[in-house]
Image: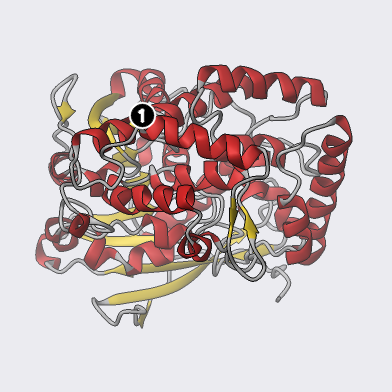
Amino acid sequence: MAAPSSKTPSPGRIAWQPCASPSGEGTFECATLKVPVDWKRPHGATIDLALARHLATDPERRIGSLLINPGGPGGSGVGFAFSAPDSFSPELLERFDIVGFDPRGVGLSNPVMCDSDRVAAQGALLYPDSASSFADLREANRALGENCRDLTGPLVDHMDTASVIRDMDAIRAGLGEKRISYYGVSYGTGIGQQYAERYPHRVRAMTLDSNMDHSLGTWAYQKTETIAMEESYGQFADWCARTPSCVLHDRDARALFDSLYQRADAGELVLPGDPPYTVTTQDLQSIAFGYMYDPASWFQFAEDLAFLDAADPAAARSLKRRGEPTEFAYLPVMCQDYDFDVPSYATLARYERELARLAPVTRLSSLAWTDLTGCQNWPTKVTNPPHRLRVDGTPPILVTNSRYDVATPYSWGSNAARQIGREAAFLTYDGVGHGDYWLSPCARDAIDTYLLTLKTPRKGAHCPAVWPTGPSAQRQSPTGLVNPLPELLGTGTHR
């Protein structure tokens, strides 16, 4: 990997060049922009941010640039921009240049690199069950973080969202825009929230879809995520009970998950194979968590649970994990944005017991739990600690959240809207899933209308839930647009 440049960032506009998307569809341009590794030392070492944009298809009616981010941390904004012809409505494509960037340390923007063996070793320790294994986890976390620094350089210490929003404003300036329009989903909402807080007068329009809540302490973070997982799985179980074509229609899906969990906890959930695969409780929780992102996948989820219950060999193939990645931006961001350190294994064990009481079926949120355990003894500082948003002077901001969102709970969205205050218009999607724009035609229309006209939905607006009606609905949103988030974010730990 090339070391970060030591040259001063060059002033002026971004120098775009024609480029092709992986699909070959659409008219795109690509560029890079130099930004400081450390914004406190603006004339020090730099990195190149990678950018891509889909040009407005009706340039005479072009409103400006719509900057986008797909979440993560670790999602590629360049990939998100390349997906624009499939991911966004024709109306947005006509009126905006859709601009995506790989945030610092991600994708083509000087990615954080870590040794895959250390990533795997740390991953195996994320569910400690004793003071000894907790100590091993802390040691592995520190070793992994230091290894990432050795392989990547000083950028690892400057991965916080506060640095990303400085990068985003440099992109705004490079685009020649006095005010920027922005659509952020999932972790991308955290970027948008903090951008609006720091640069309120540089916002034309901002949609925050499926929201982070950066004000939360450790326990509130765990509690809200765990309740969201339990409620989302409950929605799946209820849907299956009223949907004759669900393979678990005649069974109690809550009781089935509990049975599978107990078998896995006893080491008795073993799938045939060469070698046989012993399913863990963590496997079950992670599988269930992933399927809650989009109800369009629920027919397959029900089949997977039935396979697991029957110990069918076909299920073993679906559980095999991909090779461990060498790019690893997630924890370097999360561990600098949240102070998750706990004083002892006893505290961690108490959290686990209390979470299981709150969520007797699913027990905990696998994402929130590994955020917590993965940040124990992480070697970088919490440079962007949690705080309540203080937004003043922006135009109206559209905040949306689904009622049952496993990754960014509804309480996070409603709380973010309250923190933003009178500048926020809050839209509730009454269904299940993550990424309202692709889950709900109603939410998509409201977002499009707002971004195009600045007209927000009425106060207290709701969009009705959309439920899958047959297996043909799998892996495609009800809008007919492809939800790009799973592919963009991969199969690892992401929002």
Q: Nearer the viewer, residue 5 or 191?
A: 191
Q: Position of residue 289 (x, y in %)?
A: 46, 42
Residue at left offset 31%, top offset 42%: 248
Q: Is residue 76 visible?
A: yes
Nearest to the observer: residue 70 or residue 280: 280
Which residue is drawn at the image coordinates 76% and 45% (left, top)?
Answer: 125
- Give the residue type at disc 1: Gly
Q: Residue at x 81, y 26 (%)?
A: 345
Question: Toward the viewer: 372 or 474?
Answer: 474
The quadrant holding residue 454 is top left
Label 1 belongs to which residue?
234
33 relative to 188, above or below: below
Residue at coordinates 83% horizontally, 47% vertically from top-left?
Answer: 142
| Figure coloring | secondary structure
Q: Quadrant of the N terminus?
A: bottom right
Tell me if mark 1 has few (under 14), some (14-19) or many (20+) residues whose alpha carbon lies within 10 angstroms of its own.
Answer: some
